[in-house]
Amino acid sequence: MAATRTLHAEVCIVGGGPAGLMLGYLLARIGIDVLVLEKHDDFLRDFRGDTVHPSTLELLGDLGLREEFLTLPHSEVRSLDVVVNGIRVKAMDFSQLPPPNDFLAFMPQWDFLDFLAGHAARLPSFRLRRGAAATGVRRAGSAVTGVTAVDAEGELQIVARLTVAADGRASTVRAATGLEPREFGVGVDVLWFDLPKPPAVVRPTLAYLDRGVSVVTIDRGDRLQTGCIIAKGRFDEIRAEGLGAFKESLARAAKPLAPVVDALDDWESVKLLSVRLSRLETWHRPGLLCIGDAAHAMSPAFGVGVEYAIQDAVATANRLAEPLLLRAIGGPGSALGVTPRDLAAIQRRRLPAVKAMQAIQLQLHRAIARPLDRPLLSNPPTAVQRAALNLIVPAVRGAGPRVIGHGLRPERIDEVIARSR
């Protein structure tokens, strides 16, 4: 049996997703010794968040990476409509935002992660260890001093002054420290599948709503990634009704998909995403910080999970840059390093925005999950419905691009980090 190996790092980040890689890259830019553990050998996971918001484009611009990033294959969307019972309503217009970041970019998440990992790999203080899964934490009294892990060669001990759990909503590190997230009841799940593009051009659409059926589409270049929002726990019932009935409901709700729904020829092509919405009340322990989905699982609504994870990483790097640098150079106050006060400050900064967005998501899911025995809108709308649209739509159209595009507490990268190479 292979002997346990020991690795050392100033900061060990568990999880090579958007939060983990962005934080690792930012800290390595200022010379902090960072080790990122990613349990998979690559980033190829389907049906992961692939919306790159204007706020993220702005952050990439701070780092001098935006133009190179946009040379990667992607699609750009400046407005999103909602189609309710066949009536198209222009819901969000991102072109209202200041240029040049006045659009949503859609890119497979694995391309985004490969891009970040590639740039981080050029930095001498950054290490990414793929195929290494965390199994627990190391402790010295009440403090976390690193993690235990396993890879293809056997067991690992990672000794670190700071451990960051960025390993998702089922975080191993979080569970090992006894931190338990508060779960919020979400009444919906999502069925994800791919469809070929219809012969006619499909306009960018946030959602198609028809009575109890809600459909979203994401342009993947040669295909449409399609999601059908269903009441939680209803998948078995939908399967029992038959694939034909499911395809009919898709074609009725999202009429542009009618010519291509027959390409869905078996249930094996349909993947169930169980939607969860949760958050920690406390994100930290001595020597440990949780960020991204490990701290707060967002629902797929508005695609903000990646945006908020990256903003967590930026807020963390901004706050910890000074204490980590002081320790690295042995300057005044270097003996302290990162303190519980620093970690608590990161939570205080990020938690209010997370709470507010999750409240918005919960309200949306409750509205969608409510069974309807009649259309949301008449076709044509009644006078009362038109009046309601005239009140609601301009308000959403005005605030939505800012709230969704930049988040409720946008982050910008500190100049010390942005100017470092």
Image: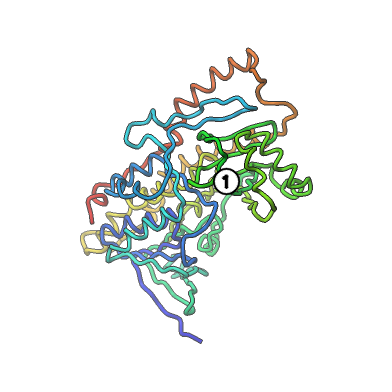
Residue 324 coordinates in the image, percent (x, y) = 29, 59
Seen as rendered, the residue at the extreme front is 199
Q: Is residue 225 above or below residue 252?
A: below
Residue 20: quadrant of the picture: bottom left
Seen as rendered, the residue at the extreme top is 383
Residue 109 coordinates in the image, percent (x, y) = 46, 52
Q: Check disc 1 and give the amino acid type.
A: Pro
Residue at 44%, 70% (x, y): give it. 140
Seen as rendered, the residue at the extreme bottom is 1
- Using residue 294 as the reference point, say whether residue 237 is left or right of it: right
Residue at 42%, 54% (x, y): give it. 111
- Using residue 203 as the reference point, say whether residue 127 is left or right of it: left
Task: Work out whether residue 420 or residue 286 is closer to the camera in this orientation and state it.
Answer: 420
Q: Quadrant of the C terminus?
A: bottom left
Residue at 38%, 74% (x, y): give it. 7
Residue 209 coordinates in the image, percent (x, y) = 63, 32
- Using residue 279 as the reference point, say whether residue 271 is left or right of it: right
Residue at 40%, 46% (x, y): give it. 311
SS for callout 1: strand
Task: Work out whether residue 99 or residue 320 is closer to the camera in this orientation and state it.
Answer: 99
Q: Is residue 182 above or below residue 387?
A: below
Task: Work out whether residue 366 or residue 261 is closer to the camera in this orientation and state it.
Answer: 261
Residue 366: quadrant of the picture: top right
Residue 144 coordinates in the image, percent (x, y) = 44, 65
Q: Which residue is mark 1?
A: 196
Residue 284: quadrant of the picture: bottom left
